[in-house]
């Protein structure tokens, strides 16, 4: 597919702040499944800071905005050619050892219920079949319902609730995979959703599980599939916060409010 | 004869380095000693050198007791120690560059990958980063104990932000003021070049993007930190700014310091803040102590951070076991300083041995420091041992055990006169473009008779440490 992205994040502060610092993972990953045609990130009055490729292969770009400022906009526009690799992250250059992704973080810590859920996958032979099974049981256990959870909901809480969004699905899958010794990580990106997809689905998240012999393989429990040509991968981390496309902090007393719009379109009709 | 090596008396004979101190000791009447001790305390209090002790309550500005009886090394004893310390500091840095790079030592099967990659001190955020001059740990504090004339063992390594060097400097300063004659009669190597060497070391690791004479700052968590005195003392001696997180900010590709003349670019941050707190954008988002955006500047070559984030993975007590292996692997040398034999409670066979021999062993938490959360078997009651047994069983991987070492003693002034007390040694090795060690260290002394715990947080004291010139 040839996907176009238009992604606007607008930050408003109820009183002007003195400065804003941001760290972006907003560039599509370089791997065999996607090729960037053009891509541009702009920040209102932003001063570009350091840029580098981190150990996980993500392009990181820092930005600062000098205050006083009461509104800034991060605007991402670009087009990406995508291929269906059945979720396999082929040709991705990275240095972090998979084993690093066995370490729990607060939102991905497994409680007894998650651990029990993870055990069901042991009926399968081999890591790939187990990963597929885990993605299926997580999808069954957590129904998609926007608004049921919030940004800081943990995997354990989402499972107890039985409802959540893609972030909760990804956290729960990661937690389960780590329980049975499979390295797993959180991936943020975009999704082209055909059936009147809402904005919260276009800015999407899923999980990757490391399968010996294959490498990292994506699983999207929210949509019961592996990432294909409808997906654009941005970056990864141990959990949602670690993989966030935008991490930012403002200096000052202004209280922040956020407004996000994402449009992903297929240019090849 | 005592089972402990006495550094001053060998049988009835005075060992060479202490020869002159015997006369000094004998010539000092008790009244003068009391007077001098009071004078020393007064001096320390006037300088303001105090050390808050966590979890003990009482006076947070308590002085660490200073013992006036110096600890002495000969030039040849020190020469060997120096070689061993520098060797270890080089190996530890080579290890850090390796594990954040290709991980050759793990591929070679010389250290278990789990100990490194699943270590809580391993920082994914710096994987692939090669800091300036290939140095992660710029100040390596190596805790050493002695058990005989030629037997030295490394107890632990401190690769993050080892504290205590201000005591090395202040103890000397105060001894020279109180006993100038002693320093005229003995040829003692000076230690006062330490701040200048530290400054030079920090300047030598200026980042890639720095084309000017580097501006260095010392980043402290603030005055409530137990080592704040040391932070301000070192900044002062080096002639650099002492800053808190709020004094710095990131703009564009650099870190800046607020000054009365406007923002000034900062090139090297000597931080005395833990990794978790240095940048809320990268690590703990609730940290107010750090500088938002600092890590991105660091990773893109705009600033150097000393010690480098992630350095802690080399000084964890489970990784410690493998330091001799690092020396062989990276340097192709045999380790000059030996490790204390260590049992990993995470290993089944080791755990069984440890649980069967708790009353003989010292057990420590893998990530513990400051003498907290440890068990000294021979000095503990049955109840203490049993409650510690439960803790180990609950989380074996969190504990290591070592034999109770026969720490050497040195003469120490006590209420009844002079008596042997157990000591350890913490030298501070500086690693930048070069590698340097001033001839001196912090000697910590367990002031309670028979005690083997020298940590200041557990009531230990300090001594001036002499290295005699050839």
Image: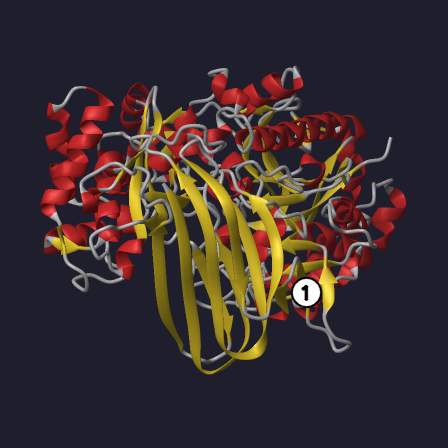
- Give the secondary structure at mark 1: strand
Residue A8 placement (x, y as % from top left):
42, 64
Q: Please, is residue B95 above or below residue B187 in the view? A: above
Residue occupying the point 26% across, 35% down: A178
Residue B391 placement (x, y as % from top left):
26, 40
Can residue B35 be seen?
A: no
Looking at the image, residue B157 sits to the left or right of residue B166; the answer is left
Work out whether residue B54 or residue B277 is closer to the camera in this orientation and state it: B277
User: Which image quadrant: the C terminus of chain B?
Assistant: top right
Residue B201 in which image quadrant: top right
Looking at the image, residue B378 sits to the left or right of residue B174; the answer is left
Display colour scheme: secondary structure
Work out whether residue A178 or residue B62 is closer to the camera in this orientation and state it: A178
Residue A241 in which image quadrant: bottom left
Residue occupying the point 70% across, 67% down: B47
What is the residue that sits farthest to the bottom in this orientation?
A: A15
User: Which image quadrant: the N terminus of chain B?
Assistant: top right
Looking at the image, residue A237 sits to the left or right of residue B182; the answer is left
Can residue A162 be seen?
A: yes
Q: Circle 1 sits on which residue?
A: B256
Work out whether residue A141 or residue A146 is closer to the camera in this orientation and state it: A146
Residue B435 placement (x, y as % from top left):
75, 35
Residue B224 placement (x, y as % from top left):
53, 68
Residue occupying the point 83% across, 54% down: B213
């Amino acid at each position: 597919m040839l996907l176009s992205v238009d992604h606007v994040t607008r930050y408003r502060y109820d009183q002007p702040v003195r400065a804003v610092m941001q760290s972006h993972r907003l560039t599509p990953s370089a791997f065999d499944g996607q090729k960037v045609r053009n891509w541009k990130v702009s920040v209102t009055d932003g001063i570009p800071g350091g840029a580098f490729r981190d150990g996980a292969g993500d392009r990181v770009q820092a930005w600062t905005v000098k205050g006083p400022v009461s509104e800034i906009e991060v605007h991402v526009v670009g087009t990406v050619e995508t291929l269906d690799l059945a979720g396999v992250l082929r040709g991705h250059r990275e240095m972090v050892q998979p084993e690093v992704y066995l370490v729990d973080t607060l939102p991905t810590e497994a409680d007894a219920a998650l651990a029990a859920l993870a055990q069901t996958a042991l009926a399968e032979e081999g890591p790939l079949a187990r990963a597929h099974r885990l993605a299926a049981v997580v999808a069954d256990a957590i129904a998609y319902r926007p608004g049921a959870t919030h940004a800081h909901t943990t995997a354990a809480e989402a499972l107890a609730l039985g409802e959540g969004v893609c972030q909760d699905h990804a956290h729960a899958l990661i937690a389960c995979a780590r329980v049975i010794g499979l390295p797993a990580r959180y991936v943020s990106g975009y999704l082209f959703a055909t059936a009147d997809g809402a904005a919260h689905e276009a800015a999407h998240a899923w999980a990757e599980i490391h399968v010996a012999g294959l490498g990292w393989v994506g699983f999207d429990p929210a949509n019961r599939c592996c990432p294909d040509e409808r997906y654009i991968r941005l970056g990864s981390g141990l959990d949602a916060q670690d993989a966030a496309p935008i991490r930012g902090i403002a200096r000052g007393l202004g209280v922040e409010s956020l407004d996000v719009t994402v449009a992903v379109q297929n240019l090849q009709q | 004869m005592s089972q402990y090596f006495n550094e001053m008396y060998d049988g009835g004979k005075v060992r060479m380095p202490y020869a002159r101190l015997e006369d000094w000791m004998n010539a000092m009447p008790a009244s003068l000693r009391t007077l001098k001790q009071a004078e020393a305390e007064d001096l320390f209090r006037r300088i303001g050198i105090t050390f808050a002790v966590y979890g003990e309550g009482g006076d947070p500005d308590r002085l660490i007791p200073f013992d006036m009886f110096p600890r002495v090394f000969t030039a040849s004893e020190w020469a060997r120690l120096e070689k061993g310390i520098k060797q270890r500091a080089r190996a530890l840095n080579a290890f850090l560059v390796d594990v954040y790079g290709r991980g050759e030592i793990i591929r070679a099967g010389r250290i278990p990958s789990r100990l490194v990659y699943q270590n809580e001190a391993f920082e994914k955020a710096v994987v692939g980063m090669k800091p300036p001059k290939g140095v992660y740990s710029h100040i390596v504090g190596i805790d050493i104990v002695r058990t005989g004339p030629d037997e030295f063992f490394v107890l632990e390594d401190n690769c993050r932000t080892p504290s205590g060097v201000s005591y090395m400097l202040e103890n000397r300063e105060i001894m020279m003021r109180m006993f100038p004659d002693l320093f005229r009669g003995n040829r003692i190597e000076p230690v006062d070049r330490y701040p200048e060497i530290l400054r030079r070391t920090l300047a030598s690791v200026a980042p890639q993007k720095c084309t000017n004479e580097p501006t260095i700052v010392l980043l402290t968590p603030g005055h409530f930190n137990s080592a704040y005195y040391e932070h301000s003392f070192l900044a002062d001696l080096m002639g650099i700014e002492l800053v808190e997180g709020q004094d710095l900010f990131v703009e564009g590709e650099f870190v800046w310091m607020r000054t009365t003349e406007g923002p000034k670019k900062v090139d090297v941050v000597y931080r005395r803040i833990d990794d978790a707190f240095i940048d809320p954008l990268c690590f703990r988002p609730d940290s107010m102590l750090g500088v938002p955006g600092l890590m991105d500047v660091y990773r893109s070559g705009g600033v150097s951070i000393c010690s480098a984030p992630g350095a802690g993975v080399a000084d964890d007590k489970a990784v410690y076991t493998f330091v001799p292996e690092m020396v062989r692997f990276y340097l192709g040398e045999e380790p000059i300083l030996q490790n204390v034999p260590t049992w990993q409670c995470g290993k089944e066979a080791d755990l069984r041995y440890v649980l069967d021999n708790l009353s003989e062993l010292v057990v420590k938490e893998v990530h513990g420091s400051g003498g907290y959360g440890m068990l000294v078997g021979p000095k503990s009651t049955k109840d203490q041992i049993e409650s510690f047994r439960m803790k180990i069983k609950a989380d074996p991987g969190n504990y290591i055990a070592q034999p109770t070492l026969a720490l050497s003693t040195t003469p120490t002034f006590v209420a009844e006169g002079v008596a042997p007390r157990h000591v350890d040694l913490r030298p501070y090795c500086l690693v930048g473009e070069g590698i340097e060690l001033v001839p001196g260290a912090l000697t910590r002394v367990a002031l309670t008779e028979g005690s083997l715990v020298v940590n200041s947080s557990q009531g230990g004291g300090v001594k001036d440490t002499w290295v005699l010139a050839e």
